Image: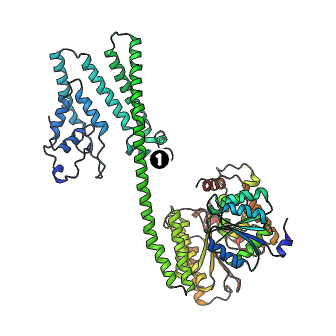
Amino acid sequence: MTDQGEARGRLRVFLVDDHAMFRAGVRAELGLHVDVVGEASTVGEAVTRIAALEPDVVLLDVHMPDGGGRAVLDAARRTHPQVRFLALSVSDAAEDVIGLIRAGARGYVTKTISPDELADAVRRVAEGDAVFSPRLAGFVLDAFAARPDAPVTDPELDQLTNREREVLRLLARGYAYKEIAKELFISIKTVETHVSNVLRKLQMSNRYELSRWAADRRLV
Amino acid sequence: MGGATRGEPAIVTARPEQRRLYRTRDQRVVAGVAAGIARHLGVSILWIRVAFVVLLPLQGLGLLLYAAFWAVLPLQPRAEAEPQRRNLMQLLPFLAIGMGLLLLQSLVFGPMGATGTAGWLVAVIAVGAGIIWHEADPERRRLWSETLPQVPWLGVVVAESDRRAFLLRFIGGGVLVSVGLIGVVAVYSPVQNFDAVITGVIFALIGLAGVAMVAGPVLWRTYNQLRAEREGRIREQERAELAAMIHDQVLHTLALIQRNAADVKAVQRLARGQERTLRSWLYKPVALPNERFAAALEQVAAEVEDTYAITVETVVVGDRETDERVGALVAAAREALVNAARHAKVQTVSLYAEVEPDQLSVFVRDRGAGFDPATVEEHRHGVRGSIIGRMGRHGGRATIISEPGSGTEVRLFLPASRESIAASRDSAGKDES
């Protein structure tokens, strides 16, 4: 399901962030690699313009007024499921982004990221890959840790396979996909598959720790 | 009349600002009412107690007044550490005198008439109401609300130690009030007729309900007002705390950044350090570095970041208590980080730690210069020896993997307990990858 054609051409990226200076910076840096087709600073503006422009990737700020990135994601995914979302967060704390990832974002990057890495992350998300920072990998390991008293309703969704756990551990240690493939003697494609599976479990598992994070953020 | 206290309470003249009427904690026999009044008026406690006892025969006026004061006066705020123990023996002489006076009254004036009994019953009602009233003591409410922040009144039911006492007191107070009410009605009803008593009780209850309906909204409004004021005070306090922190730290850091704008490394270090401080202020970590493993690792990473102006990406999965061996693991991790900062010539170092039931593992990885482990210089060998040696001394293991041009990884393993050391030694052979 990868869109190889778009990956070879210039990607169409839409920015959503309520911080104007940050948007200007990203537009200048990213404009070298991709086409920034539009920007929005509020939830309402974002929803309408995403529907109109239908970009390939949307860079979505987590913390915004009127519901934040979550509201944009919920609205856009109903009408345009083919648009891919990459969450932007000021902090590297998994709690900030877990709500967004469970709503359908393909991963997140922090705002201190370098322009090259940001372009690379956008490209990977457009191709269908997930972008996991080491800290998010650590959080997933923690959330899916085998606890004897935790009820497991769906083993397929609520548990990680040993291979997925190994891949996550290497991700958390700062390994790139290439290095993980070399370490585990598997292909890069297999690594990507494992990471995608972990993302799917992260989004759909009913594990208490994950639903609690999401519920907490909604109450705040 | 032994056991009576000294005549002059010396505190009143020394501290004129404490003229508010409290029930005192020290020198109290039952509820500190007499002691409090005596302190407020500046007379001897003995006279106040005698006055209460003397008023008893007047249809229980003494008891009524005592109960009223008890219900209304607040308890003196706890100032000193040690609580004064109540000396109930002091009560006995006064009880004896009270009984004597009542006996005298009934002998001289004949058995108590309707008004006398009614007066006593009203006093009983007052005592019962006071008991119930004190269940709503704000100090007690605060204790409850600390147990269960969302639902303070439910905290009453949940708080273990107070539960039985609360129920007993509530029921006791309720019983006293109802007995008093029924008694008053029974005394004043013209015929000793059960139906009439019931009707009387119903009317009495309707009267009480009417009073409650009138007084209720006023009390509720006052309570809400007080609560709003308290919330405003708390908000003000938090705002002051935030302003102090911003003034001390953030403004300072921003000024330093402006001054050192040309030095990129200094700016990066200042920004990252301030970011870390702000984040820990926001999220208020619950663990201390000398108590928990994750906190200790994060502190070590922060120190290396500040000293060498690099970025240490820390990821910790799981947590546990620190002890001497865990401390050695943290120290070895610190050495590995410092080595990476000094020799790898790179901006970012990854620190990953995992706490499993049977072992702790720490991985320090950089994508820097790397070196060939086979050809180590003398001083590097010494440093390496201290990492490997330190881990070995505590039953753990250290592996250093490096390749010139593709970075270095230091892997540290520490079995969780002495028992698993032997097990890990057995499996040490097959772990190398």
- x and y percent of residue A68 in the render? 64, 60
- Residue B120 appears in the rendering: yes
- The amino acid type of the residue labelled 1 equals Thr
A197 or A47, nearer to the observer: A47
Q: Is residue B332 above or below residue A41?
A: below
Badge 1: chain ID: B
Q: Which residue lies under the disc numbered 1?
A: B147
Displayed quadrant of residue B405:
bottom right
Quadrant where the image shows the N terminus of chain B: top left
B114 or B134, nearer to the observer: B114
Residue that appears at 19% across and 17% down: B106
- x and y percent of residue B290 in the render? 48, 67
Q: Secondary structure at mark 1?
A: helix
B313 or B429, nearer to the observer: B313
Q: Is residue B393 above or below residue B7?
A: below
Displayed quadrant of residue B44:
top left
Q: Is residue A164 above or below residue B305?
A: above
Residue that appears at 24% across and 41% down: B28
- x and y percent of residue B407 in the render? 68, 82
B193 relative position to B328: left or right = left
Quadrant where the image shows the C terminus of chain B: bottom right
- Residue A180 appears in the rendering: no
A30 relative position to B100: left or right = right
Mark 1 surroundings: few (<14), some (14-19) or many (≥20) residues within 10 A: some
- x and y percent of residue A175 in the render? 71, 74
A196 relative position to B102: left or right = right
B255 or B284, nearer to the observer: B255
Q: Is residue A1 above or below residue B310?
A: above
